[in-house]
Amino acid sequence: MSEPCASPTPARARKQLKATTIMPFVTVVVVVGIFQILNPSFLSYHGIVTIVYAMSYFLIAACGLTLVIMMGSFDFSVVAVMKLSALLCVLFIGKLGLLVIPLALAVSAAIGFINGVLFTKLKVPSFIATLGISVVLDGISLLSSKGFLHLLEDERFRSISVTFIAGLPSIFYWALGVWLLCTVVSVATPFGRRVFAIGGNPRAAALSSINVDRHRIIVFVLSSLLAGLAGVLYVSQQGGWSMEIGGQMMIPLFASVVAGGTSLRGGTGGPQRTLLGVIIITWIQSGLLMMGLGREIQFVILGVIAILMAVATTERGKLTRLMVK
Amino acid sequence: MNHSHTKRSGLRGVWEATKNYPVILIVIGLVVIFSTLYTKLFLSPVNLTATLRQFVTLMLFSIGPSIVMLLGSMDLSFIGIWMLGSVLLWILTPVIGPPALLVFPLLGLATGFIAGVVHTKGRIPSFILTLSILITYWGLTVVLSGGYPRPVKGYGFITASVLPRVPTPFLWSIPIILAAIIVVLRTRLGIYFWAIGSNEEGTRLAGIDVDRYKTIAFMLSGTFTGIGSIILFEHLGGSAPVEFNMNNVVRPLVAIILGGTPLVGGTGGPHRTILGVFTFSILYRGLYLSSLRPEVIDLVVGLVLILSVVINSRGARMKGVDVT
Amino acid sequence: MVDKTGAPILRVKNVSKTFGGVVCALDDVSLEVYPNEIVGVVGENGAGKTTLMKILVGIHAPDRGEWEHNGVVVPFPRNPQEAARKGISIVYQEKGVIPSLKVYQFLFLGNEEKHERRWGLQIGKMKQHAREILEEFHVQCDIEDFMYDLPLSTQKMVEISKAVLRIRLEQNRDTTDSVIILDEPTAPLTIEERRGMLGEILRMKSNTSFVYVTHIMQEVMEYMDEVVVLRDGKRVGYFDMSAQKATEDDLSRAIVGREILAQPHEKGPHMDEGGEVVLSAQDLTTRGCYYDISFDLHRGECIGLFGPAGSGKSEIIKTIAGLRSNDSGKLLLQGREAKQNEPAHKRLSRGVGYFSGDTANELLHDWPITKNISILNISKVVGKFLRFLRFKAEKALAARIVEQLRITTPDVNTLISSLSGGSKQKVTVGKWFEKNPAILLLEDPTIGIDVGSREDIYQAVLSMKRKGMSMILVSDDLKEYSTLCDGVLLMRQGRVTERISVEQISEVLKS
């Protein structure tokens, strides 16, 4: 078709880009502001440490999930992997000492591998595969733990998360390190670029010499690996394990990834945006907790926020390749 | 090439039916296995009653989502409708008496409407959307109930015994199930839902308002869940629940897929889901009678979910879906 | 002979349509259809055929134009239902079939009212009516068959029956003056199925008229009563096929608008001369698509696969690219045998690149130009020691390509979605230019692009060829073959009929 006119100005595209980029920042400021007003001790040293404890392991798991979502898939097994990994540490610390850590990580990675294979080779949609796996893992956790609470008192193990450096617990630095690593890999390496490409347009990615299946499996492995790491650090931080770990963490996890600006369609966003989302969500949760509101109303609010954020970060206009079903 | 199937009767017909409904074989197999293993327990009247009760619970939760799945979408809000409806019932019964039962279908209808509109206009994937609704409703339930299960008196007539050994809720559920089947098999709605699930673009090209019918599907799902919840409320204890278990969400999905309604939609429906629920109930009761722990059973459920999706996607590949 | 004594059953005059104030899709086009005839509508891609059809069935509203019915001016239909009431219905080229429905359900999809009561559908009546329709149109299937079970040609026949049925139901009459628009109906069919369908359509002519959009010259010559030619949105030609003896050459000239001459161009090594063989196809066969395809490609050479739609050329090039599998035969790439059914990225690692004019599948639309180019050329934008992406290098690379190909864009960071069609395609060409594979497969590389961009792309492709890149071209644009190719394999019905040199292309039209 002859198109005699010059190419249209990309002004509108630029405007929308600004909105999705700026909004998370604005939200953070607003949220922090509101809670500080409502509860003056929000930003006290004690308050901050509490939030750091709530946020660190969460951020690690969220980074892994972000990678999967960037790629255009879903991983619902993150929390179950975290729980199982923590359980492994608790159960085997006696026999294996600190070697439980590589054990837990290896098992987590293996689960991720299974997820990846189910998805790429057996063509099971990712949310069903990971959902099913999460049910299986929870069953295993319940069986192995017999439902009991387990304490973990090994000093060395606990020092991984709870050693205070420069006023903040070590888990903070772990989380920061993981986040930096994920961000750099996503934004500045060929691998990260390819993962985004698969999320943006799998067919174009395949035509651009990307081995789509292999990358998908790797990303699922990474996601579970990071979930496993989160589990290890979490149990190190808490000093104990129960079936309640993670609870209904899946929704806040998703909400933070989406709130940060990583679109569920894939191809945009990344761990750097997730940091903002995690800050928003965990600060909201902590703030609500400090105000004495129960867990459940948090979920009400989070449910609404998740939907709002998803709507806001959805691209308007042109046709979308992903079938929104 | 002539594709006329002039005769579908006799053994050929049975073979065809089994190919279309492989679940039948599984049911027969399960019944045989369990009957041999636990003859006394499995074939006892007590077990039969328990199986029927299991059937009712699972079936009434599964009707709604099995309609939406025809579109190729997911509706996970059903548990939420039941929970929130229950607590609303607790609040409203002292005020307006038995008509408070209407809160269930009304809530279901409203939920379906909101879900449908947000999904079609807001372009939110149905899975995430209805999951968020579910969690939100759960939260509201806990808030409104103060965190405690709240019994509501006065609805015992729903479960009052009519036939010996046959749970009355089962009798109540029959017309509901039939209504759902009629809607899908005998009205244009079923055809439209299948069409949208099979080829949304083509359905649009045929001049059908796809957004409108998608919303109708969600509304039907919510309404059926609501009506079913009237029975489920009393059937499951007569009090507003506070516990939330992801298993309750997963099991109906398993039953639906097991019954032969594919995730991507295009075919199937409540008539198939009956088989899936039936299979699942038998499987569950059989496992329950063995000395396996409940956790193992849930584990098996997870595995069955994955397996049934894998098996089903090997079947008629009627459209090339880029799996996400 | 078309009977023009009565009034035409469809007449539209001076139809014009512009999209977004910028793209002129149709400019003053008129069309008439008389009873019991097949009117062919031909033209290049982007000529306006689809837009015109969509206006006729009410999907688009024209900016200007008149619709005459029995001499009275009536409004254009606003949706497909209204169009059906006016007696017009369309069978789309693709996506029209609902695979999981049974035949009788599909036939009445969207028009169930006739067999519907308050409580639901009267399925028995619907099935009976369906049976009658299938019998009337000699469709070889059972009403209980699932659409996905039917062969493609039968599916099309069911679609055509549905189109006629829709008109009858909307008009509430049993026989009508109807016009069925067929948009390239035989494109996905195998050679054998095509004849059967066209025979059936001829038979249906006694009840219905057809507007038949096609690229296939053979169909136009053999089956059409009248032919209307569109080019660049205008009606540029009309042929009464029964009266005049129009030749394919006449038609092609009208479609393309210029003489098909061999253009002076860089000549690569002549086929069959010496030179390294970079690709060798040996007896490649896929049942139903192509048979025993064998040829050698030398370094720096460009071979074209030319033939009417459905000759198999598209399937062959996709097979070589790794997007389709073949049933049998061997493919040697640079001497080594390529595994059957290798995925595309593996083929690329063997030096075979592929691109098509279908930018939806080639580019990432939410990404800027820079990233689209670098995703294929990662090695050029990573650091030497640590394999990190170097953004400056990425930007420089994109800038270089933008300049070389004269891509109209304010900035290299512009998103692809903001670019015009020609610019998008240039980005695709640019990234392959940079990638420089040993073998490049091009399918419809300049489809729907303006003339200026086309020339720029040809220049780029020719310079790649000069540097030793070998190419295979598949296209519907004859001028493209003469500009880019050294030799052409003519294909018909899945087989290679002849190898000719590029100068002989114009002769081909006469055969």
Image: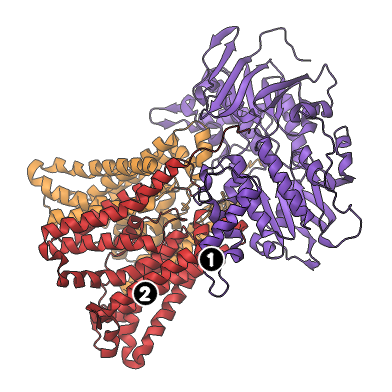
Chain colours: A red, B orange, C purple
Residue placed most toward the observer, C394 or B237: C394
Q: Chain of mark 1?
A: A
Residue type beneath disc 2: Gly
Residue at horizontal 85 percent and vertical 49 percent from the top: C267
Q: Chain of mark 2?
A: A
Q: Position of residue B83 (x, y in %)?
A: 22, 53
Q: Which residue is mark 2?
A: A177
Element type at mark 2 = helix
Let me know if marks 2 and 1 both belong to one chain: yes
Point out the tag, 2 or 1, that comes first from the N-terminus: 2
Crowd around label 2: few <14 · some 14–19 · many ≥20 (10 Å): few
Q: Which residue is mark 1?
A: A190
Element type at mark 1 = helix
Q: Position of residue A59 (x, y in %)?
A: 32, 68
Q: Position of residue B136 (x, y in %)?
A: 25, 53
Q: Position of residue A40 (x, y in %)?
A: 10, 62
Residue type beneath disc 1: Pro
Q: How much space separates mark 2 and mark 1, taking CA atoms?
A: 20 Å
Res C430 seen here = yes
A275 lies above or below C70: below
The reply, left or right, for residue C138 in relation to residue A286 is: right
